[in-house]
Image: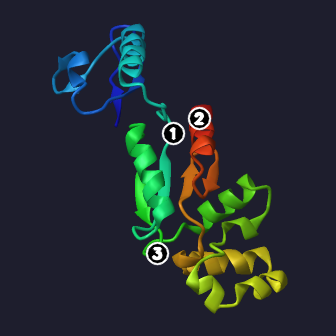
């Protein structure tokens, strides 16, 4: 969890990533955590070395998943094993927003076809393999927004990038870049 630390004696305000059980590293004052910037950074670096995580602080990580998907379960186990905090959303009940879909298209260099779950039953039932050739990007994104079962998963969106599918080495690289 990301906790803001109120401005200390030097006037610096910083954010520190904390996990339950490591709060004792930070001094308590009136229910909050208070430290000067050098102290907070020193404690943060000490905590990172102790926990050995890929740090994803200072940016949000949204992961759209489906419980019945084996690839999604692998991705969630990866996040748990590396102690990465993410917002997990059910892709079928709440598909990615149009803004998120457009951001993902931009992340893939304008290739919106990569966002489709081509092995899904809905994709095959709707005969999208043939229909996609005649669709515009706007029509395709509207279709994806309306039916979360058509979106390739896991669908990961961050503040500055995004990707679909799960490949452990790719996830490590992307999360380390952050």
Determine which quarter of the picture holds residue 178. top right
Question: Which residue is labeled 3 in the image?
Answer: 92
Question: Alpha-carbon distance for marks 3 and 2?
Answer: 27 Å
Please say whether residue 9 is visible from this viewpoint.
Answer: yes
Residue 146, relative to residue 51: is it above or below?
below
The residue under the point 67% across, 74% down is 141
Q: Nearer the viewer, residue 97 or 51?
A: 51
Query: Label 2 near label 3: C-beta < 8 Å?
Result: no
The residue under the point 60% across, 61% down is 100
Question: Which residue is labeled 2 in the image?
Answer: 178
Q: Nearer the viewer, residue 39 or 7?
A: 39
Determine which quarter of the picture holds residue 1. top left
Question: Alpha-carbon distance for marks 1 and 2?
Answer: 8 Å
Q: Secondary structure at mark 2?
A: loop
Answer left or right for 82 relative to 129.
left
Question: Which residue is labeled 1 in the image?
Answer: 59
* Mark nearer the N terminus (3 vs 2): 3
x then y, percent, for residue 39: 36, 9
Residue extending furthest toward the right: 134
* Mark nearer the N terminus (1 vs 3): 1
Residue 152, relative to residue 82: is it above or below?
below
x then y, percent, for residue 140: 71, 78
Q: Secondary structure at mark 3?
A: loop
x then y, percent, for residue 97: 56, 67
Circle 3 packing at 10 Å, graded few (<14), some (14-19), many (20+), is some
Query: Label 2 near label 1: C-beta < 8 Å?
Result: yes
Circle 1 packing at 10 Å, graded few (<14), some (14-19), many (20+), is few
Residue 138, relative to residue 26: is it above or below?
below
Answer left or right for 178 relative to 73.
right
Circle 2 packing at 10 Å, graded few (<14), some (14-19), many (20+), is some
Please say whether residue 26 is visible from this viewpoint.
Answer: no
């Amino acid at each position: 969890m990301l906790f803001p630390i109120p401005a200390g004696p030097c006037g610096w305000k910083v954010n520190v990533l904390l996990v339950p059980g490591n709060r004792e590293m930070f001094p308590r004052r009136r229910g909050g955590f208070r430290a000067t910037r050098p102290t907070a950074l020193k404690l943060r670096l000490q905590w990172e070395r102790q926990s050995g995580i890929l740090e994803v602080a200072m940016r949000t990580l949204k992961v759209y998943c489906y419980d019945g998907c084996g690839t999604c379960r692998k991705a969630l186990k990866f996040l748990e094993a590396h102690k990465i905090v993410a917002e997990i959303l059910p892709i079928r009940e709440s598909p990615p927003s149009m803004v998120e879909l457009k951001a993902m298209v931009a992340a893939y260099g304008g290739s919106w076809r990569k966002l489709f779950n081509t092995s899904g039953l809905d994709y095959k039932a709707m005969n999208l393999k043939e229909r996609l050739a005649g669709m515009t990007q706007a029509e395709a994104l509207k279709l994806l927004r309306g039916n979360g079962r058509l979106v390739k998963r896991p669908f990961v969106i961050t503040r500055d990038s995004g990707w679909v599918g799960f490949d452990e080495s790719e996830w490590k690289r992307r999360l380390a870049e952050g």
